[in-house]
Image (cartoon, rainbow, N blue to C red):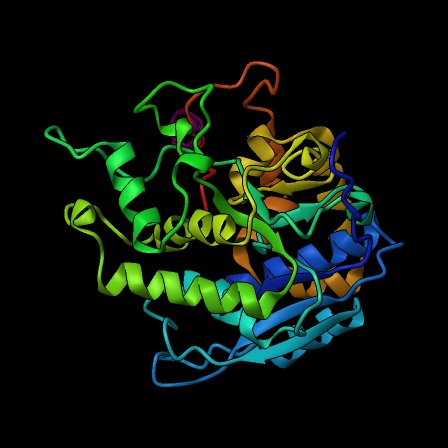
Amino acid sequence: MARSVKKRSEFNIFVVAQAGRLGYEALLFAASLKHSDPGFKGRLLVGEPQPGPRWDRDPRLPDHIRSALEALGAEIVPFDTPVFGGPYPNGNKIEGLLALPEGEPFVFFDTDTLVTGPLSEVPFDFTRPSASMKRENTWPVIELYGPGYAAIWRSLYDKFGLDFAATLDLSQPDEYWQRYMYFNAGWFFGPCPRAFGRRFVEYAQAINDDRPEELVCQQIYPWLDQIALPLVIASFGGGRPGPELCGLDGAVTCHWRILPLMYARESDRVIEVLEEVSAPNRIKKVLKEYDPMLRMIYQGRGRKVRALFDRDNLPRREQVIRNRIKREGFWMR
């Protein structure tokens, strides 16, 4: 008999925002959540890194962006960054977890995400953490004389006393990158943010400070969060997402990453939500401060980019799309 798992329908959403681009992206995320899932009963927690020795400039949000986020129901959660900070801003998603409510299930999203459907109806199983599979073969980079994927990943699982064999996708061939558990850290979830965050910090620090011999030739940055994430997920009994989560990176959320790419390749529904939630004056007057949003959304450059591509016949390689946009003079980020 299949194991019955109770799904939690209420959870908190966590994003990280700070002065600059992430503040505008967070506002767009919050507006899309309110628009696409008005029945969401959890809390939208916006982590805000605080000034400290690891920041050259004050990373806190400007007051007017803070107010705009709070008007959409977001709660600003300050957190300190004793480990990462400015030198590795991806570490904000790791350290920020430690400031969230103990024991309350959470789902993290990068701010460059749009909610396009009822997120509250996604049947998360918070007893089995998982993360986004919308990733490319970015890490590790295999050298001519090795070691290979298996040796590199096994060394990490061994370092933390985890079961490497249990994480393999045996439908994929040996030494093919998709055989080994690797995620995009654009979304992930778990049962307790503080427990998850403590382990995430521990593993990321240990990899950075005392990497296994097999990783000596590997570039750690900017991939450190994505190197440590599958290990953290495995340590909590999680793994790859099942089909019940296909709405993420699908009909429910879109990790758009860069506005020109969003207009070039995402669905009509995504663009419809983007333009609808950015239209109200209280949102528009803030987003127009950020030049890529001003030009792409409000001055029509995004629609010109969209007209360059057939969504049913897109180039396979992202670089080809980027190059076409750049040749036409529409690239910005």
Task: Specify the quadrant that holds the N terminus.
Answer: top right
Which is nearer the eye, 90 or 19? Answer: 90
Q: Residue at x 79, y 53 (%)?
A: 8
Asked whether residue 288 appears in the rendered view, the answer is no
Q: Is residue 215 magenta?
A: no
Residue furthest to the right: 39
Q: Is residue 321 magenta?
A: yes
Q: Residue at x 63, y 73 (%)?
A: 100
Residue 164 image point, x, y percent:
38, 40
In the visual, does 270 lie left or right of 182? right
Residue 27, quarter of the rendered image: bottom right
Residue 135 image point, x, y percent:
46, 36
Residue 155 image point, x, y percent:
26, 45
Q: Is residue 19 above or below residue 212?
A: below
Residue furthest to the top: 313
Which is nearer the eye, 141 or 87? Answer: 141
Q: Is residue 100 above or below residue 127?
A: below
Residue 325, quarter of the rendered image: top left
Magenta residues?
318-324
In the visual, does 328 lie left or right of 237? left
